């Protein structure tokens, strides 16, 4: 199993829905968000704003950082279900 590069969260500020907010995420999550934004051809702030808006409709509204982690986990789970592996490739029997 590959060793994770343990690192404390890094705080970034961005404007979401017209207001400044700070988000603290570990570098691995920032990298995953940047990769997803690039995959979608959208700005990082646009992806974060979409997750922010979606979380507000939840029965139990999570904080934004938690919502972002769950969003990324959901994307990874969907890709595993589609491809059979986290990295993509051929589906597993």
Image (tube, grey):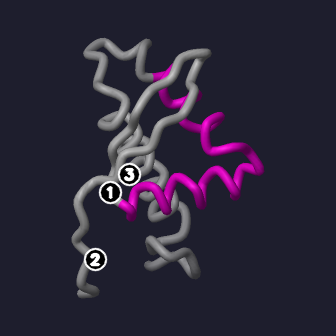
How far apart are labels 1 and 2 at the CA level? 10 Å
In the drawing, what numbered circle is on residue 73? 3
Q: Nearer the viewer, residue 19 or 34?
A: 19
Q: Of callouts 1 and 2, which one flags the residue occurring earlier in the amino acid sequence?
A: 2
Reply yes or no: does residue 53 show up in magenta: yes
Residue underneath mark 2: 5
Left or right, 67 with reference to 45: left
Q: Say which of marks 2 and 3 sits in front.
A: 2
Mark 3 residue crowding within 10 angstroms, few (<14) / some (14–19) / many (20+): some
User: Which of these two is toward me, 19 or 5?
Assistant: 19
Does residue 79 show up magenta in the picture?
no
Residue visible at 43% across and 12% down in the picture? 57
* 86 or 21: nearer the viewer: 21
Give the dominant element type of the magenta stretch: helix, strand or loop: helix
Q: Residues within 10 Å of mark 1 (few under 14, many from 20)?
A: some
Instruction: Please provide the residue range marked out in magenta.
Output: 27-54
Q: Residue at x 61, y 37 (%)?
A: 45
């Amino acid at each position: 199993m590959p060793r994770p590069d343990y690192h404390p969260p890094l705080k970034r500020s961005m404007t979401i829905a017209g207001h400044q907010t700070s988000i603290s995420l570990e570098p691995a999550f920032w990298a995953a968000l940047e990769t997803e934004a690039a995959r979608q051809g959208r700005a990082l702030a646009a992806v974060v704003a979409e997750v922010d808006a979606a979380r507000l409709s939840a029965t139990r509204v999570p904080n934004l950082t938690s919502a972002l982690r769950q969003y990324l986990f959901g994307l990874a789970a969907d890709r595993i279900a589609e491809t059979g592996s986290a990295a993509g490739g051929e589906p597993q029997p």
